[in-house]
């Protein structure tokens, strides 16, 4: 069971199902939609697409990055992977929050949206959210051209540029602005997938402390 529906959690769930299809997967999300809500860095660099296994990506409704793309919309990636994960049998508890957690009985009680009732979920392994304490506060933007100052950047398949920087400068003519707390936006996507693999390996090896 995952306490959030981040890219790392979604990728980890895919890794687990690839190893053992019969696993029961639950993911909790405080928002009512997974992906397409908020934006994180989508720089994929010269290594390019794909950054995840092809069957993790939903086939319907979302455009794939091109081979020459060096950035993608990270929220699109999370959404597409979430759709595929749901099709593989995983349960997303959207618009929910944890009310109680009993570690002894391995039980969590969550809220049910639009209802005064609650739901109990029993688990074998509980994956806790990543922490971002002590990391840098990055500013990001999407625009038709790059700013004059140095930035961490990539080009999306639609021709727009995604770029990230640390100071207070403000680019002109942006299509979207963003913020993100983390170490390095240039490796954020790959770092999320790498961490997902580490956690899944720990779970599959029998180490319950992911």
Image (tube, rainbow, N blue to C red):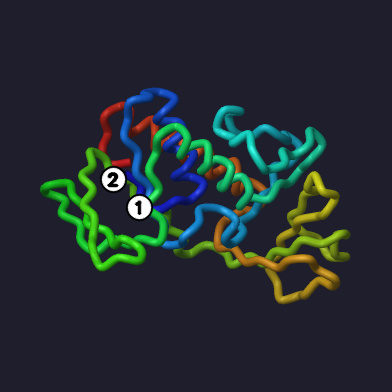
Q: Quick one: 14 or 42, which is closer to the camera?
A: 14
The quadrant holding residue 65 is top right
Residue 76 drawn at (x, y percent):
63, 49
Residue drawn at x 67%, y 42% is 61
The quadrant holding residue 15 is top left
| 56 to the left or right of 20 | right
Q: Mark 2 sits on what residue?
A: 126
Q: Quick one: 114 or 135, which is closer to the camera?
A: 114
Few, some or many C-alpha atoms within 10 Å of disc 2 (few <14, some 14-19, many ≥20)?
A: some
What kind of element bears circle 1?
loop
- In this view, the residue farthest toward the left is 104
Q: Mark 1 sits on what residue?
A: 3
| 80 to the left or right of 195 | right
Please report contact status of discs 2 and 1: CB closer than 8 Å, yes or no.
yes
Residue drawn at x 20%, y 57% is 101
| 171 to the left or right of 208 | right
């Amino acid at each position: 069971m995952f306490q959030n529906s981040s890219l790392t959690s979604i990728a980890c769930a895919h890794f687990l199902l690839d190893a053992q299809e019969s696993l029961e997967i639950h993911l909790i999300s405080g928002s009512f939609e997974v992906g397409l809500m908020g934006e994180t860095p989508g720089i994929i660099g010269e290594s390019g697409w794909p950054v995840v296994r092809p069957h993790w990506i939903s086939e319907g409704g979302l455009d794939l990055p091109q081979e020459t793309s060096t950035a993608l919309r990270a929220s699109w990636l999370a959404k597409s992977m979430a759709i595929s994960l749901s099709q593989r049998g995983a349960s997303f508890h959207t618009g929910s929050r944890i009310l109680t957690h009993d570690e002894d009985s391995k039980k969590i009680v969550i809220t049910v949206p639009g209802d005064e009732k609650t739901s109990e979920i029993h688990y074998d392994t509980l994956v806790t959210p990543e922490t971002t304490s002590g990391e840098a506060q990055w500013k990001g933007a999407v625009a038709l051209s790059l700013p004059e100052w140095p930035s961490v950047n990539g080009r999306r398949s639609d021709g727009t540029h995604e770029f990230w920087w640390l100071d207070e400068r403000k680019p002109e003519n942006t299509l979207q602005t963003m913020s993100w707390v983390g170490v390095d936006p240039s490796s954020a996507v790959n770092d999320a997938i790498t961490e997902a693999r580490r956690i899944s390996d720990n779970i599959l090896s029998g180490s319950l402390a992911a």
